[in-house]
Image (cartoon, helix red, strand yellow):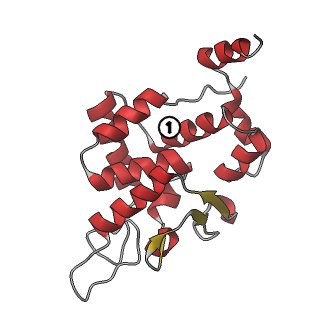
Amino acid sequence: MQTRIKTISDTELHTLLSNCSCTWHRAILTLLADTGLRISELAALRQDDLWIGDAPVGELEVRAAIAKNHNPRHIPLSPRAIEATRDLRAALWFTPPGIISPWALPAARPSRHLTARCLQLIVHHNGLKYLNIRLTPHMLRHTFATRLMRKTNIRVVQQLLGHKSLSSTQIYTHPNSQDLKEAIATLN
């Protein structure tokens, strides 16, 4: 028996992102929801992973050093994720003169990045505030994968999530009632 995954609906995701008033919290939520990054991968991103020269990257390289099992992967960024990168840059990357942080999500000490636990708390807080649910970063990863499964094949989802085994990706193949209705509608 496969485990039932926890996701949020497209409507809930829209509500979360459109109501989140903190620019950099919204950017964190957007990057998790639109890239499927693991929380540890997001925490360890450097500024140069998201921004090169005068512009945000169009494709995020999850470096081997931060990827689970040290398997790097490339994730094309949605327009919304690119905008989130711009928001992060404007909100967090400008530090006092003489202090430079390489991290996309710098901590109070510029030599460190926000911890995965800190990011979990940000996601949890916003989930309670805007959706009245116990939202986790992994639920946003599951939401990303589930949304993709409706649009593309399982091998693409596997690669974007960085799963070694196809069986790890198969948990996202559970159709919901809307998927079933749409499948029947295509018969006419």
Asked if residue 176 is positioned above or below residue 76 in the image, the reply reads: above
Residue extending farthest to the left is 96
Q: Is residue 73 left or right of residue 12?
A: right
- 15 or 108, which is in the foreground? 15
Asked if residue 181 is positioned above or below residue 98 in the image, the reply reads: above
At label 1, counting other C-alpha atoms closer than 10 Å, the crowd grade (few under 14, some 14-19, many 20 or more) is some
Q: Position of residue 148 (x, y in %)?
A: 63, 39
Which residue is at a point 69% across and 44% down the rendered structure image?
A: 157
Q: Is residue 86 left or right of residue 48?
A: left
Placement of the N terminus among the 4 image quadrants: top right
Q: Is residue 46 visible?
A: no
- 144 or 150, which is in the foreground? 150
Q: Position of residue 169 (x, y in %)?
A: 71, 40
Which residue is at a point 61% across and 69% down the rendered structure image?
A: 63
Residue labelled with disc 1: 139
Mark 1 residue element: helix
Q: Is residue 48 visible?
A: yes
Which residue is at a point 41% across and 78% down the rendered structure image?
A: 102
Amino acid type, label 1 = Met
Residue extending farthest to the bottom is 98
Q: Position of residue 165 (x, y in %)?
A: 78, 47
Which residue is at a point 60% across and 71% down the rendered structure image?
A: 65
Q: Quadrant of residue 99?
A: bottom left
Asked if residue 156 is positioned above or below residue 181 in the image, the reply reads: below
Q: Is residue 19 left or right of residue 52?
A: left
Q: Quadrant of residue 106?
A: bottom left
Residue extending farthest to the front is 188
Placement of the C terminus among the 4 image quadrants: top right
Q: Position of residue 83 (x, y in %)?
A: 41, 56
